[in-house]
């Protein structure tokens, strides 16, 4: 049964209109806005299943050598229509080492293989199109993350955890430049329950330990990815969780990536401490702004980027939202609409990111973090 928990209180239209919106997205370069389907809040959860041991994936010719720069792309909310194909073509033209697919793939059960075939036709059968689940495949109703994992398996060496749900990866495997930590807070799994990412839970500790270990090993950059954002000027509230989001800031994660809201939005560098005891969603505190230009220093704060523009109908940017002043750049249905991908190049000294629009769109954004 659909629920309505978006922070703007928009009514949920039936599944039939969602299906119609997705059908139209295959026919139009700028598809209509589908009905948002918010995830539930934070009911008590059963103990999470144990994470499986690390497995050795097939070697990937795309993987960089030890100490080399790491080039990756990231986007979520994709679909199987013309917009998705344009974004995949843009990714193919960029030739990254890997792509982070931030959840919400085909939006319909039974289309898993069609989605996988669409990806491999454009990026190649061995390209590392690395998955983390969204709410449209986590609980099995609109798809099955297990089926996506089977047809788009991990292609990167050294991955640890539960691929598709919660995993970490150092790239390159030797002398890494980036640690990727992919998690799944704030969305339903089978049985209608979210995984437990509450303070000091097993999955909270797993995430915190992965961040701390990256710092202790002097890995230059830490990137956390998940489907749900916390701050947003689209349709949703803080579904990733306020405490979990503040933990990422306190531990000085460099870049946090998400999808779910069908907009592009990128914050200034945010930090807690001093006059900002913690980040509080649905409010604004200028003391939480660490740096407001596009050239930032590592360690000063965390940048949050939502890239929910992988090919499915866009949502409006809501400029009246009090969180708007946290954002340096936004794009949506009513403001510079664009499908596209975040394109990131990480060296030992710099993480440089830019938004690359798909063919037919012109919105752009860029920012850098330097050590």
Image: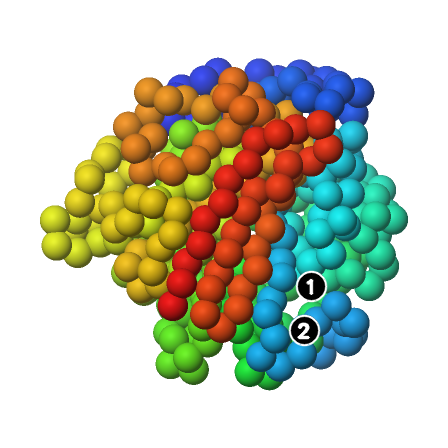
Query: x, y (%) of residue 321?
Result: 33, 25
State whether residue 55 is above or below residue 10: below
Q: How many marks?
A: 2
Task: Identify which residue, 246 or 170, lies in the foreground.
Answer: 170
Is residue 98 rendered to the left or right of residue 237? right
Q: Quadrant of the N terminus?
A: top right
Task: Identify which residue, 25 or 351, lies in the foreground.
Answer: 351
Residue found at the very far left of the displayed protein: 275
Q: Which of the colour schemes (rainbow, by chain, secondary structure, one colour) is used?
A: rainbow
Residue at screen point 45% across, 18% down: 10
Residue at screen point 77% across, 76% down: 59
Residue topped by disc 1: 97
Query: x, y (%) of residue 309?
Result: 60, 35
Residue at screen point 84% across, 56% down: 124
Query: x, y (%) of residue 157?
Result: 68, 76
Q: Is label 1 in a helix, a strand or a loop?
A: loop
Q: Quadrant of residue 52?
A: bottom right
Query: x, y (%) of residue 178?
Result: 52, 69
Residue topped by disc 2: 64
Q: Is residue 195 visible?
A: no
Do the residues bearing badges 1 and 2 touch, measured as CB atoms within 8 Å?
yes
Numbered mark located on residue 344 in the image = none
Residue at screen point 67% across, 73% down: 64
Disc 1 to disc 2, C-alpha distance: 7 Å
Is residue 88 rendered to the left or right of residue 278? right
Is residue 7 rendered to the left or right of residue 315? left
Q: Quadrant of the C terminus?
A: bottom left
Q: Is residue 313 visible?
A: yes
Q: Quadrant of residue 198?
A: bottom left
Within-10-Å neighbours for mark 1: few <14, some 14–19, many 20+: many
């Amino acid at each position: 049964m659909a629920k309505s928990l978006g922070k703007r209180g928009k009514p949920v239209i039936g599944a039939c209109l969602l299906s119609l919106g997705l059908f139209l997205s295959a026919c139009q370069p700028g598809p209509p806005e589908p009905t948002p389907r918010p995830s539930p809040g934070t009911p008590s959860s059963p103990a999470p299943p144990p994470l499986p041991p690390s497995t050795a994936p097939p070697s990937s010719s795309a993987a960089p050598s030890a100490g080399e720069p790491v080039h990756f792309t990231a986007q979520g909310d994709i679909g199987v229509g013309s917009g998705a194909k344009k974004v995949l073509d843009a990714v193919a033209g960029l030739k990254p080492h890997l792509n982070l697919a931030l959840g919400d793939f085909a939006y319909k059960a039974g289309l898993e293989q069609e989605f996988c075939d669409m990806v491999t036709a454009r990026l190649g059968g061995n390209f590392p199109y690395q998955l983390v689940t969204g709410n449209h495949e986590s609980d099995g109703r609109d798809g099955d993350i297990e089926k996506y994992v089977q047809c788009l398996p991990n292609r990167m060496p050294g991955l640890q955890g539960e691929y598709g749900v919660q995993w970490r990866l150092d790239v390159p495997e030797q002398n890494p430049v980036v640690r990727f930590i992919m998690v799944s807070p704030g969305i339903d799994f089978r049985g209608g329950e979210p995984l437990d990412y509450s303070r000091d839970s097993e999955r909270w500790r797993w995430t915190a330990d992965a961040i701390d270990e990256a710092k202790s090993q002097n890995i230059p950059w830490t990137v956390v990815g998940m489907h749900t954002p916390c701050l947003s000027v689209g349709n949703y509230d803080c579904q990733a969780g306020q405490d979990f989001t503040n933990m990422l800031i306190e531990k000085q994660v460099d870049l946090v990536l998400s999808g779910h809201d069908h907009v592009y939005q990128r914050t200034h560098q945010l930090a807690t401490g001093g006059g900002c005891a913690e980040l509080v969603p649905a409010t604004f505190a200028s003391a939480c702004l660490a740096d407001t230009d596009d050239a930032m220093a590592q360690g000063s704060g965390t940048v949050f980027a939502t890239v929910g523009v992988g090919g499915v109908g866009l949502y409006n940017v809501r400029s009246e939202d009090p969180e708007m002043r946290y954002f340096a750049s936004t794009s949506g249905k009513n403001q510079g609409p664009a499908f596209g991908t975040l394109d990131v190049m990480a060296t030992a000294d710099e993480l440089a990111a830019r938004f690359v629009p798909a063919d037919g769109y012109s919105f752009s954004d860029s920012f850098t973090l330097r050590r």
